[in-house]
Image: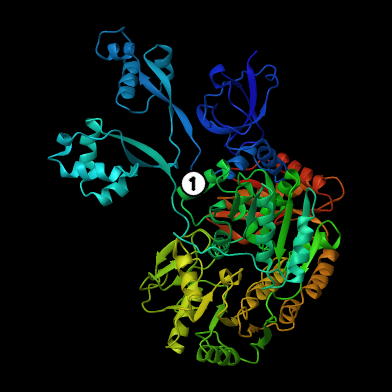
């Protein structure tokens, strides 16, 4: 009886599919990648179940090929991915694809090939065929498209599977080794060959190193190989992602609070979720390092998740200094090949600590002893496209399945996590003071209704004075403004024409670098025209609003002796982020202006002043989490000040000084903010006191999206009790990347019932045209 397996194909399709396993592929196991036929083509999939019988009345196709000698996933990780697919209403194959390094998938297509009979027919030596068939046969022979089914049936053409290559693969380097000592006569008149032999007497060498030592070595090696004196080969090598050398560090003496937290984590037996609530600068990272060291000593591995690539270089350097080659790093700042190498090191057990952004939650670390989610409150842990998983929640489930500890760390925990700790579902570990004797920085609130900011730098008089004093003292400063670009709004003052993105319902932002107008959502960019494209009037285009690029330029003009730099998405591409942070750490930059990338986890002892140029940008967003986000950003950026020997100072400029988010950030009072915000959420049944699912409807034709959204709402009226439906309504960002967007919110108290209701709504609606109805479980963004 043939063996059967269930395969999750790397396609946006629900469920798994049954395939038979040929005898020559009997080594296929759960977690292995396979190439399977799906419709007229072949795709990569992962075996998720073995055994069982073929479904009755269904023709079962065979697995085409096995892509892994060693399964890419262990069974535990396969089960985790299947749970993610079920919980987040996502295709299982897409979840498994997201858990692998990009560029590793393969496919195959059926390519027509002219058979010997077909070739004879083209030469006029075969059977007579109709003219239309002959034209189709000639087209296939010329590599052109044609209808091949009749040709295959006549035996004139055969279909062959042509397999694609993966986009990334292991890197190899040419090697040379000495097989035997040459006779004197073999190298007497060949000084380069003699030099190569001399170099290889010390052992095998890579060709690049040999070529650097012996100019012209390539030709000499060919001649020596032909004579049987040397042997050429190849070996795998890894792409470098770390600095050449990192000075090792030793564990610090923990404070009493850190020691208590470490004892709690070490004493956990099996799965144990912790909230490590520590103020900024309280030494949460040292707790992570020492807790992981104990896990490594016990023969297990660790996963450390950070929300942003901006955090990774500095944190990675600390982990590398403590654990050396046991660390692997996984984040979007690496090339596909670099990420692939790091993933392979983890899978092979060469590295036992995976450090990276949200997708690192799927890293092949086994056996797993601990997962750390640093800055667990950060919204970037939620994937907003494709498989809409939340890495923090997946981390908790992975730790549960592995029987591991899971430490969620933050100075400003999300309301959901804090409620779990308050209710006893998570163990609360607190670090209420900084690890050094230095207190938290003094925070002043500047009322912009009284102190009007400078129109170019956005500095009020108090903040301008504080910055001048900081520069005079030789200290560093961070200025936070959550807007990129030079000008945020460009308009013709003659006719009022506003420059907006053609694909999104947002204004284009002017960037002086390159003189471009750019959309920060879809990436569209265009040159700034000389005259208005609507009224054609010359010299009437004006730029309004300020972003980080303009503030950087204005500060340079106002403080000509200061070294000013900018940290945002425009300057953090590729290796630029690491270089910029290294320069700031070396104190080659005096003032760093940035978006929320400057708020997250950085530890620069030279920073004594932090200025928030406008605290109100997030408060006006149509999102029930806007107050929470504002409080978190203000508290986090304030925590960058005063982490060295000198006291820190923070100035928050705002038009709403009485807002609870601002008042609580001024006093570093998380508990007061949590109490007020939690009570407000409870009245409305919003998280953490209820559950939400967003049905997001989008499409290229506006009226089709509108009608589909109302179909969803009509179907919602037939849902059983216990579920509240809000909407339909246009999304605040009504159009994005050329697609109109509507939404329907489903609210309730019980997760399972809520997911079942959302599933019924999607199944009950037939989308029109290219309209998509996607399910977002536990949504983070209301935009």
Q: Who is closer to the viewer here, 437 or 440?
A: 437
Few, some or many C-alpha atoms within 10 Å of disc 1 (few <14, some 14-19, many ≥20)?
A: many
Task: Give left or right: position of 147 versus 88.
Answer: left
**Which quadrant: the N terminus?**
top right
In the rendered view, would you say 557 is above or below 254?
below
Task: Give left or right: position of 461 versus 424.
Answer: left
The extreme front residue here reads: 184
The number of numbered badges drawn on the structure is 1
Which residue lies under the disc numbered 1?
341
- What's the residue at 40%, 11% (across, down)? 154
In the rendered view, would you say 354 is above or below 448?
above
Q: Who is closer to the viewer here, 86 or 199?
A: 199
Q: Secondary structure at mark 1?
A: helix
Relative image position of residue 163 (x, y in whole percent): 44, 30
Task: Give left or right: position of 56 versus 541.
Answer: right
Q: Who is closer to the viewer here, 473 or 322?
A: 322
Q: Is residue 596 visible?
A: yes
In the rendered view, would you say 623 is above or below 447?
above
Relative image position of residue 64 (x, y in whole percent): 52, 24
Q: Is residue 130 visible?
A: no
- What's the residue at 62%, 18% (across, down)? 59
The extreme left residue here reads: 189
Relative image position of residue 652 (x, y in whole percent): 64, 83
- What's the residue at 59%, 55% (across, down)? 355
**Which quadrant: the C terminus?**
bottom right
Scheme of image coloration:
rainbow
Relative image position of residue 416 (x, y in whole percent): 77, 60
In the rendered view, would you say 424 is above or below 81?
below
- Residue 93 sits in quarter: top right
């Amino acid at each position: 009886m043939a063996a059967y397996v269930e395969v999750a194909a790397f396609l946006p399709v629900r469920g798994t599919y049954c395939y038979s396993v040929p005898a020559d592929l009997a080594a296929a196991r759960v977690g292995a990648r396979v190439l399977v036929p799906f419709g007229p083509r072949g795709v990569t999939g992962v075996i998720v179940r073995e055994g069982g019988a073929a479904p009755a009345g269904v023709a079962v196709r065979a697995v085409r090929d096995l892509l892994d000698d060693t399964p890419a996933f262990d069974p535990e990780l396969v089960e985790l991915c299947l749970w993610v697919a079920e919980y987040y209403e996502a295709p299982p194959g897409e979840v498994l694809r997201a858990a692998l390094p990009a560029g590793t998938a393969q496919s195959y297509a059926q390519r027509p090939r002219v058979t010997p009979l077909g070739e004879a027919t083209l030469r006029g030596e075969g059977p007579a065929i109709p003219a239309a068939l002959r034209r189709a046969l000639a087209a296939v022979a010329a590599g052109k498209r044609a209808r091949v089914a009749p040709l295959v049936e006549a035996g004139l053409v055969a279909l062959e599977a042509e397999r694609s290559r993966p986009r990334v693969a292991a890197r190899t380097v040419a090697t040379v080794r000495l097989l035997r000592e040459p006779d004197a006569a073999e190298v007497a008149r060949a000084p380069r060959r003699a030099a190569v032999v001399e170099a290889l007497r010390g052992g095998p060498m890579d060709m690049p190193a040999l070529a650097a030592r012996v100019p012209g070595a390539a030709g000499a090696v060919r001649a020596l190989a032909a004579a049987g004196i040397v042997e050429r080969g190849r070996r795998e090598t890894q792409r470098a992602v770390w600095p050449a050398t990192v000075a090792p560090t030793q564990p610090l003496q923990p404070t009493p609070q850190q020691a208590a937290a470490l004892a709690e984590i070490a004493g956990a037996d099996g799965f144990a979720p912790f909230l490590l609530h520590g103020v900024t600068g309280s030494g949460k990272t040292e707790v992570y390092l020492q807790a992981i060291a104990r896990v490594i000593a016990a023969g297990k591995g660790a996963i450390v998740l950070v929300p942003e690539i901006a955090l990774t270089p500095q944190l990675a350097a600390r982990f590398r200094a403590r654990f050396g080659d046991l660390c692997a790093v996984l984040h979007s700042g690496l090339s596909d090949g670099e990420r692939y190498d790091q993933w392979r090191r983890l899978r092979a057990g060469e590295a036992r600590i995976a450090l990276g952004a949200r997708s690192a939650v799927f890293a092949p670390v086994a056996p797993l002893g601990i997962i750390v989610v640093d800055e667990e409150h950060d919204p970037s842990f939620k994937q907003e496209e494709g498989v809409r998983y939340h890495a923090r929640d997946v981390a908790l489930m992975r730790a549960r399945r592995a029987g591991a500890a899971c430490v969620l760390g933050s100075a400003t925990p999300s309301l959901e996590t804090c409620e779990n700790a308050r209710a006893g579902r998570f163990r609360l570990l607190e670090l209420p003071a900084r690890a050094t004797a230095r207190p938290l920085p003094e925070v002043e609130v500047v009322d912009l209704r009284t102190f009007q900011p400078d129109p170019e730098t956005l500095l009020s008089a108090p903040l301008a004075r504080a910055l001048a004093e900081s520069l005079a003292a030789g200290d560093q400063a961070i200025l936070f403004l959550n807007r990129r670009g030079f000008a945020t709004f460009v308009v013709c003052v003659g006719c009022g024409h506003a420059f907006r993105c053609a694909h999104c319902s947002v204004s284009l932002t002017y960037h002086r670098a390159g003189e471009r107008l750019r959309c920060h959502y879809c990436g569209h960019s265009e040159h700034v025209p000389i005259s208005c494209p609507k009224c054609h009037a010359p010299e009437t285009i004006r730029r309004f609003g300020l972003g980080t690029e303009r503030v950087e330029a204005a500060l340079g003009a106002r403080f000509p002796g200061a070294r000013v730099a900018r940290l945002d998405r425009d300057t953090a591409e590729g290796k630029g982020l690491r270089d910029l942070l290294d320069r700031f750490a070396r104190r080659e930059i005096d003032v760093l202006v940035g978006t929320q990338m400057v708020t997250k986890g950085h530890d620069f002892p030279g920073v004594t002043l932090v200025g928030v140029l406008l605290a109100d940008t997030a408060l006006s967003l149509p999102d029930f989490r806007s107050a929470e986000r504002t409080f978190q950003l203000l508290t986090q950026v304030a925590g960058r000040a005063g982490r060295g020997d000198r006291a820190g100072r923070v100035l928050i400029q705002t038009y709403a000084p009485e807002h609870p988010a601002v008042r609580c950030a001024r006093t570093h009072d998380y508990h007061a903010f949590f109490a007020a915000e939690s009570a407000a959420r409870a009245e409305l049944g919003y998280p953490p006191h209820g559950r939400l699912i967003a049905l997001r409807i989008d499409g290229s034709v506006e009226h089709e999206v509108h009608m589909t959204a109302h179909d969803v709402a009509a179907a919602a009226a037939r849902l059983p009790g216990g579920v509240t439906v809000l909407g339909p309504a246009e999304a605040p960002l009504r159009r994005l990347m050329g697609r109109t967007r509507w939404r329907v919110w489903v609210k309730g108290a019980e997760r399972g019932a809520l997911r079942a209701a959302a599933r019924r709504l999607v199944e009950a609606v037939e989308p029109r045209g290219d309209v998509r109805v996607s399910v977002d479980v536990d949504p983070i963004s209301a935009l």
